[in-house]
């Protein structure tokens, strides 16, 4: 009687579109037993397609193929952009830095030139730009904004290495009374925010006047 009920259940599962492997896993029966019971219950074309589409290996292969296509496309676009950009002269870097500062730089203090960001590459460009205007690293004041659950020494070491700046340039960090773990949007904040400032009236006035010049230029 129990065997008959098992067979009835196996047939029902087969009619529902399950494969031998799925029925075997659910009922603990051998494939040879299922083959004998279910040989007259083949799957329809639509059921076979559904099983194939839901196969974990097939899904993973499909994901990997799509991911590789995206990587290849991005590499092609990156290579084209690299050719289009080419090598930058100091003048071009200088002008690019002005536009960066126009958009992201600190403008509230007329005697301070500063930039804050979570992206080390943007700050490396900013430091390069400052060197073009003949400013040495020793003039920099670096302050980190961190969260209460972050390791201060570890983050100073991170930014010191990323920016190629000695740790003695780093001032006492500002610790925000919240946790990194508690942020609902964490992208880009993994090492806090780094603020680079230069206290130099002449530089600040020059940068502001250069931005003013850009603002009245005709770009047509």
Image (spheres, helix red, strand yellow):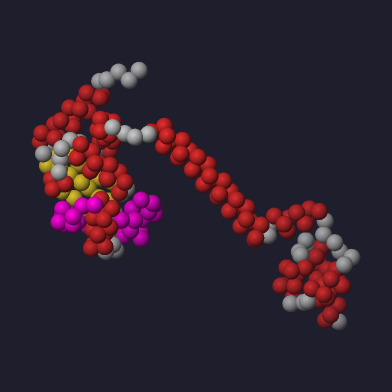
Residue in view at x 75 percent, y 54 percent: 49
Q: Does 199 sit left or right of 119 as displayed?
A: left
Report the quarter where the N terminus lies: bottom right
Task: Please name whichever residue, 164 or 113, is drawn nearer the observer in this view of the structure.
Answer: 164
Give the answer, above or below, for where 3 lies relative to 55.
below
Give the answer, above or below, for where 39 lies relative to 118.
below
Magenta stretch: helix, strand or loop mostly: loop
Residue in view at x 65 percent, y 61 percent: 56
Decide whether residue 182 is among the magenta residues.
yes
- Answer whether residue 131 is visible to the viewer in this image: yes
Residue in view at x 10 percent, y 33 percent: 202
Which of the 4 image quadrants contains residue 104? top left
Task: Please name whichever residue, 16 or 170, is drawn nearer the observer in this view of the structure.
Answer: 170
Which of the 4 image quadrants contains residue 214? top left
Residue in view at x 26 percent, y 24 percent: 215
Residue 87: % across, % down: 34, 34
Q: Which residues are magenta?
A: 164-191
Give the answer, above or below, for where 109 lies relative to 183.
above
Q: How many marks?
A: 0
Which of the 4 image quadrants contains residue 171? bottom left
Decide whether residue 95 is among the magenta residues.
no
Residue 46: % across, % down: 78, 53
Which residue in the rendered view is the most extreme toward the bottom?
1
Q: Does 86 sit left or right of 76 as displayed?
A: left
Q: Does 205 sit left or right of 50 as displayed?
A: left
Residue 135: % across, % down: 15, 40
Report the quarter where the C terminus lies: top left
Which residue in the rendered view is the most extreme toward the left?
201
Residue 148: % across, % down: 26, 62
Q: Does 185 sit left or right of 100 as displayed?
A: right
- Answer whether residue 176 is visible to the viewer in this image: no
């Amino acid at each position: 009687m129990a065997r008959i009920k098992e067979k009835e259940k196996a047939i029902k599962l087969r009619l529902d579109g399950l494969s031998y492997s799925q029925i075997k896993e659910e009922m603990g029966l051998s494939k040879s037993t299922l083959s004998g019971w279910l040989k007259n219950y083949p799957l329809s074309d639509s059921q076979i397609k559904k099983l194939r589409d839901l196969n974990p290996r097939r899904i993973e292969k499909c994901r990997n193929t799509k991911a590789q296509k995206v990587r290849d496309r991005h590499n092609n676009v990156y290579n084209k952009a690299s050719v289009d950009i080419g090598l930058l002269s100091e003048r071009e870097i200088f002008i690019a830095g002005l536009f960066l500062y126009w958009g992201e730089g600190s403008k509230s203090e007329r005697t301070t030139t500063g930039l804050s960001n979570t992206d080390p590459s943007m700050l490396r460009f900013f430091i390069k730009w400052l060197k073009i205007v003949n400013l040495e690293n020793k003039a920099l004041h670096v302050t980190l904004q961190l969260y209460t659950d972050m390791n201060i020494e570890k983050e100073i070491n991170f930014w010191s290495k990323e920016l190629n700046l000695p740790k003695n340039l780093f001032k006492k960090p500002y610790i925000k009374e919240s946790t990194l773990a508690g942020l609902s949007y964490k992208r880009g904040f993994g090492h806090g925010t780094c603020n680079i400032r230069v206290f130099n009236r002449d530089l600040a006035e020059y940068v502001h006047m250069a931005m003013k010049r850009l603002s009245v230029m005709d770009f047509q």
